Image (cartoon, rainbow, N blue to C red):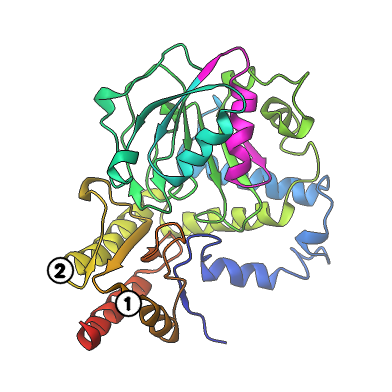
Amino acid sequence: MSRVYNFCSGPAALPEAVLSKAQAELLDWHGKGVSVMEMSHRSDEFVSILASAKSRLSSLLGISDDYEIVFTQGGASTSFAQIPANLTHGFSSACYLDTGAWSTKAIKEARKYADVIVAGSSKAEGYTTVPDFASLELDERAAYLHLTPNETIGGVEFADLPETNLPIIADLSSTILSRPLDVSKYGMIYAGAQKNIGPAGVVVNIIRKDLLARSDNANLPSVWSYANLAEQDSMVNTPPTFAIYLADLVFEWLEAQGGVAAMEAINIEKAALLYDAIDASDFYSNPIDSRYRSRMNVPFILADESLESLFLKESEKAGLRTLAGHRSVGGMRASIYNAMPKAGVQALVDFMQAFEKRYG
């Protein structure tokens, strides 16, 4: 077997050490004679895994006791509806920042539950930049302000937050654990696992406890109420046990790398390596405002679009997998999450330069 460098945006590459440990424990977890996939979610064994995952995540991000960690199912797209269903109770509106495809989808779902105020949008700029925070049209009486700080498809990322008294709800699916984060600035953080945490099927939610009181348990499905999920320790029904177990292994791996600050230093190096190669070339280009280029998802365009299929064919042959851009935008995209080693980015840069020499 030969492992390739997998640049898929999600489900994304997992650390090889994590996969190896999961493989070793697959048939017999810690001498119990069963796989994690075969355990009761109510068993002491799985309860210990869940507690470990929450403890490690709290330590990695410095999460205070003001927050609950809740694991939900369905992916971030389910959260687009679950969030307004829980957090707009008692409010007539919610504010959203529109910065790309995923924030647009979140807005569409939220409109089923409340009046959505689009506080700012970069649609007119083709989602290549971020709206000026100073000019946002915020209603401070709204339920919250929702942000998508990294647009996986477009490759736009921003770290600063608008000045507001509204609880900030952030979809950090693509960037969670890739850089230090002041959780106290957010009302809620949620992240689909399949990019920087683990396999698809589970969402990590970090929710400020005062917001849980908004969940209208009388009218919400039991499995959708954040308050109910928090009270039941994410086990209103059977949670995605194996996905949570793998998330815990990823958190353990991150600790071994030196934590989130150490990962940020590596991610800065990886992104700079790839962007510098793109910027030094007339053959490749990146369409995003340089102030808001994503460290995690790097889209790039070939000057000659007719060479795209050949680029993909030859790159895959070279062991560089899943470099096609999203079907809605085309071009190429390299997702270089935490699990992607710097050697993988260097291999991509070397290939790009060799391909340019052959066909440029």
Amino acid beneath label 2: Ala
Magenta segment: does it hold 88?
Answer: yes
Residue 292 coordinates in the image, percent (x, y): 27, 46
**336 shown above or below 92:** below
Q: Residue at x 24, y 85 (%)?
A: 359
Residue 76 coordinates in the image, percent (x, y): 58, 44
253 or 133: which is nearer to us? Answer: 133
Q: Residues within 10 Å of mark 1 (few under 14, many from 20)?
A: few
**98 shown above or below 203:** above
Q: Residue at x 83, y 60 (%)?
A: 38
Q: Residue at x 34, y 61 (%)?
A: 299
* Residue 154: image tag: none
Amino acid beneath label 1: Ser
Residue 130 coordinates in the image, percent (x, y): 29, 39
Q: Which residue is mark 1?
A: 306
Q: Nearer the viewer, mark 1 or mark 2?
A: 1
14 or 330: which is nearer to us? Answer: 330
In this figure, what is the number of numbered marks? 2
SS label for mark 2: loop
| Image quadrant assignment for residue 231 | top right
Q: Which residue is mark 2?
A: 280
Q: Which residues are magenta?
A: 68-93
3 or 218: which is nearer to us? Answer: 218
Residue 120 coordinates in the image, percent (x, y): 34, 29
SS label for mark 1: helix
Q: Residue at x 31, y 35 (%)?
A: 160
Q: Tell me: 359 left or right of 295.
A: left
Q: Tell me: 321 left or right of 77.
A: left
173 or 34: which is nearer to us? Answer: 173
